[in-house]
Amino acid sequence: MIMRLVSSVSFSVLFNSDRQESFKPTRRIRQEDPISPYLFLLTVEGLPCLLKSRVQSWSLSGILVAQSAPTVSHLLFADDSLLFFKASRECAEEVPDVLRLYCHASGQQVNMEKSSIHFTKGCSAQVRE
């Protein structure tokens, strides 16, 4: 619905105080567009809800940054997402399932070329594999 609002826009230019014929843009919103982060935040709201429900049902385990701190499973920055999970087979199978469900529901896609995975120093090679 949001993309329908954004893509249905048309522009008109004033030239010497005369309004010219209106036209529709030929490209979608570029990543650098100032409205892009706001649209991302509106559409990404489903991902934290999915992650939170999986953490609460113990399907996923976030990480503890301190003993007295709450579990952290994700951070969202403008149009970037960081996901934090215990390095286990269960989480490795659950995270892609959550992302597939989110992508199917939202119409967004994960760019695997811009994605990466990192492990803590103490994580063994066997667990990483």
Image: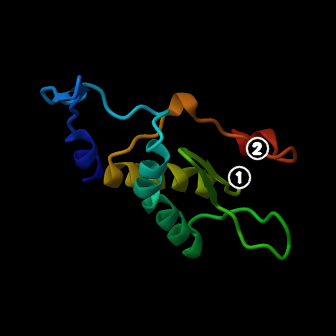
Q: CA distance from mark 1 to mark 2?
A: 8 Å
Residue closest to the eye, 70 or 14: 14
Residue closest to the eye, 39 or 105: 39
Give x and y (percent) for residue 99: 46, 50
State the SS at label 1: loop
Residue closest to the eye, 7 or 107: 7
Q: Residue at x 21, y 32 (%)?
A: 12
- Three-letter code, disc 2: Phe
With respect to residue 61, does 106 lie above or below? Answer: above
Q: Mark 1 and 2 residues: CB-CB less than 8 Å, in contact?
A: yes
Q: Which residue is mark 2?
A: 119
Residue closest to the eye, 38 or 1: 38
Identify the disc placed on residue 87: 1
**Count of numbered tags:** 2
- Camera-near label (1 vs 2) is 2
Q: Residue at x 50, y 48 (%)?
A: 96
Q: How is the image coloured?
A: rainbow
With respect to residue 54, does 19 lie above or below? Answer: above
- Three-letter code, disc 1: Ala
Give x and y (percent) for residue 11: 23, 33
Q: Residue at x 30, y 27 (%)?
A: 27
> Hey, which residue is sitting farthest front in the picture?
17
Side (left or right) of 89 relative to 7: right
Give x and y (percent) for residue 61: 65, 64
Q: Residue at x 60, y 56 (%)?
A: 91
